[in-house]
């Protein structure tokens, strides 16, 4: 025999060594029969609720509702006031729009407009801004109900501005300025022409 001795194995040749075993595949149970079968097998079952499932909502209240549910104090989300709802309703009726018409102008559902008019909606600044632009009425701040200033409208009257500009142009480009030599322009000659 050899100097090494006998070869001994640590394992029995009839045993199988498994290096890696996959656990049971996680899958979604869609029917009651699949759920009952999993319960009979004793499998661990986890249930979770889909959030915002089936709703294509663009705007929703960003307040933490779970935090409100956990609080012991009486807390609530701030809602729009009834006076706000009346202002929206009056502005909408002055344009002879229905709630549906206003909703289509601001790309929202008619229920959203109804909630704002009834004072049940949580204020969303994006929706308020769209309503202000569509109705042409301020809906936020002290000047609620006042007409909204149109974009690009100057503070001063346009007529006064053009009169002032026209008089300056006629004085600046008076005919006797052009009769002088361009090289002999001085501040004094320009001031004399303007006066």
Image (tube, rainbow, N blue to C red):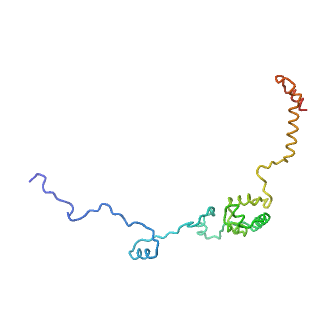
Asked whether 141 or 177 is in front, the reply is 177
Percent of width and height locating residue 1: 8, 54
Q: Residue at the location (37% across, 65% down)?
A: 23
Q: Residue at the location (67% across, 63% down)?
A: 108
Q: Residue at the location (11% across, 51% down)?
A: 3
Q: Is residue 128 above or below residue 162?
A: below
Asked whether 61 or 53 is in front, the reply is 53
Q: For this view, does 13 lie left or right of residue 65?
A: left
Percent of width and height locating residue 16: 25, 64
Furthest-right residue in this view:
195
Q: Quadrant of residue 86?
A: bottom right
Asked whether 100 or 120 is in front, the reply is 100
Percent of width and height locating residue 89: 76, 67
Asked whether 111 or 98 is in front, the reply is 98
Q: Is residue 52 above or below residue 149?
A: below
Q: Quadrant of the C terminus?
A: top right
Percent of width and height locating residue 63: 62, 63
Q: Is residue 179 above or below residue 90?
A: above
Q: Quadrant of residue 122?
A: bottom right
Q: Residue at the location (39% across, 66% down)?
A: 25
Q: Quadrant of residue 129?
A: bottom right
């Amino acid at each position: 025999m050899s100097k090494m001795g006998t070869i001994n194995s640590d394992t029995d040749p009839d045993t199988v060594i498994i290096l890696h075993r996959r656990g049971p595949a996680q899958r979604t149970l869609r029917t009651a029969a699949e759920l009952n079968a999993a319960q009979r097998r004793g499998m661990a079952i986890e249930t979770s609720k889909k959030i915002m499932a089936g709703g294509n909502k663009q705007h929703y209240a960003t307040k933490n509702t779970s935090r409100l549910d956990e609080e012991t104090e009486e807390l609530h989300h701030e809602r729009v006031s009834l006076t706000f709802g009346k202002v929206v309703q009056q502005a909408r009726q002055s344009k002879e729009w229905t709630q549906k018409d206003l909703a289509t102008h601001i790309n929202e559902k008619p229920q959203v407009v109804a909630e704002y008019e009834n004072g049940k909606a949580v204020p969303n600044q994006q929706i308020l801004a769209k309503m202000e632009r569509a109705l042409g009425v301020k809906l936020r701040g002290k000047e609620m109900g006042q007409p909204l200033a149109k974009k690009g409208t100057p503070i001063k009257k346009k007529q006064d501005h053009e009169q002032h500009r026209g008089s300056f142009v006629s004085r600046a480009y008076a005919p006797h300025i052009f009769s002088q030599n361009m090289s002999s322009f001085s501040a004094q000659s320009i001031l004399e022409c303007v006066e």
